[in-house]
Amino acid sequence: MATTTAAPAPKVTATPGEEAVLGKAYDLELLRKLWPFVRPHRKLLVVWAMVMPITIGLELALPLLFAYALKHHILTGELDKLPLDALAYVGIIAAQGLSGLTETWFLQLAGQRTMHALRIAIFDHVLAQRAAFFDRIPVGRLMTRMTNDIESLNEMFAQGAITLLSDVVKMIAIVGVMLWMDAKLTLLVLLTMPLLAVLVEYARRLMRASFRQIRVRLAAMNAFAQEHLSGIKVVQLLGRASTAQREYDEINAGHRDAYLGQIRADAWMYALVEAIGTLAIAVVIWYAAGYRGASEAALIPTLWAFIEYINKFFVPVRDLSQKYAVMQGAMAACERIFQLLDTHEFDGGGPEAEAAGKRPARPEPRTGPGDPAIALEGVHFSYGAEPVLRGVDLKVTRGATVAIVGATGSGKSTLIKLLTRLYERDTGSIQLDGVDIRDLPMGELRRRITVVSQDVLLFAGTLGENIALGQPFERSQLDQAIRRVGLDRALTRRGADIDAKVTERGSNFSAGERQLVAFARALVRDPEILILDEATAHVDPEAEQLIERGVAELMRGRTTLVIAHRLSTIRNSDLIVVMDRGLVVEQGTHEELVARGGYYATLERTFRRADAHEA
């Protein structure tokens, strides 16, 4: 019986500059970076700042009103005045409720509008990055930035963490009122403050450590889940599900334990602050018990008001642990978000990339009638330490069909990525009509070159939207492209048309139908240069025959580069370029290369066997 060895459970470590980044609960530099997103809504914050002291004043007026009624009406026996006191009390409560509602509304409105602008900025920024950026940063981590981290910032507004400012104002106001009422009693209460400060600092350190682990584990869970859900077919077919479950359980257990650390700190903080508050009240009562004098009765209203103010003073401190955790998370999320926004690896094809610098003027073509449409000279490129292209020289005549063949890993697809500037060459020159492609605006370059690859991605929407992809094509143009590639026949069999619904990733279309959609995308764009990157690799022979005429029409009169493994496609090319280990090792027509008996002749026999097997 075969046995399998489970892969070791993943270790989740904190890496500086990534998930382990944890700044101050209030970081002025980060708040400065956040300000441009808040600034358009500053009027809302001004209203909040104006209403906040009114709300605090009304709240602090209630104990004073009650103490006044107790001293001047209840203790003196003037009970006929109590209805007026009650009416004033109810009026203040109503005004406080209205003021609090206004304060919360304007603060939340400013927060939601800020988060809306920030979400758009992050999405646009990520979309503008070049392909190498996505090679370095896992999609799961980017999703964490665009969802969890934004939500952490949102909680800063939604859970009132930003009202820490108003809490400080309230606590200062409470101390001021208490000093005005009785300075000696106030000083006795303030004797508990050093103990409170030590407690808050200790709890802050505990929460900071646990929160760092929470963020690391959460990002690890997101990345792990995204990776395995994206490759769910491999996970299921090769029996990795149970192993993945064990590994995810370990990461999830670490996330749970990190949260338990924060909960313990929060619980201890709440209980000890409550105890210190009770101690402060006990000190006040102890002082009052030893008070003797003619105005003993007059002390009762003051004593009652002090107890109320002490309770109000310690409420923000009790909530501090929760609000501090939210602020700590918000600042950590803010730091990671702006690390992402400060990453400038622009692809150059979007509006943000063009805004980052001056858009180059369109250079005039510097070629004559007989000059090549595409010219590569001494092109080197590597994804890392290992070179992929080692000095490629290639000239493609205008209107010619050139097939690029070679073993897997020879650099064929990399050549296409450099030509479309998904990646930038290390050294060498790539010219289009005599103009270096780096001198061409990215939008123009990709309008002139259309790539049809073997991996076709369809987006949720309609079929027409998937062909147009946001470009303003007329419906008649889309219908014509569908007919030319033979997609109309496939749609007829399905009883569908251009308005057919497409589910996520086009899962309700077959591989062959998705490939036909890719050809329709290329046809409707009418490019100068067409690149077919293994474009018929996932198309069955029947579907390939169906689109053969459409492909021929698409290629007619255009410069075409074909990366293919099917002999029928390669044989009819004007030029065949053979690559091996990043070098062009042979060039010529099919007959010339076969007669030469070199590298291509060996490949040709492999292609012939593959075609015979598929037939």
Image (cartoon, rainbow, N blue to C red):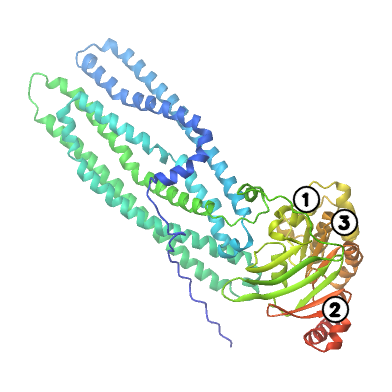
In the rendered image, which quarter contains the C terminus? bottom right
Secondary structure category for the residue under label 2:
helix
Q: Is residue 366 left or right of residue 181?
A: right
From the viewer's perspective, is the residue at label 3 or at label 2 nearer? 2
Q: Is residue 282 left or right of residue 493?
A: left
Q: Which mark is drawn over residue 482?
A: 3
Label 1: few (<14), some or many (≥20) within 10 Å? many
Q: Which residue is mark 1?
A: 465
Amino acid type shown at disc 3: Ile
Q: Nearer the viewer, residue 501 or 529?
A: 529
Disc 3 to disc 2, C-alpha distance: 26 Å
The percent coordinates of residue 267 (x first, y second) are 32, 50
Q: Is residue 509 left or right of residue 311?
A: right
Q: Which residue is mark 2?
A: 567
Amino acid type shown at disc 1: Glu
Q: Quadrant of residue 544?
A: bottom right
The percent coordinates of residue 127 (x first, y second) are 63, 53
Amino acid type shown at disc 2: Leu
Label 2: few (<14), some or many (≥20) within 10 Å? some
The percent coordinates of residue 75 (x first, y second) are 20, 16
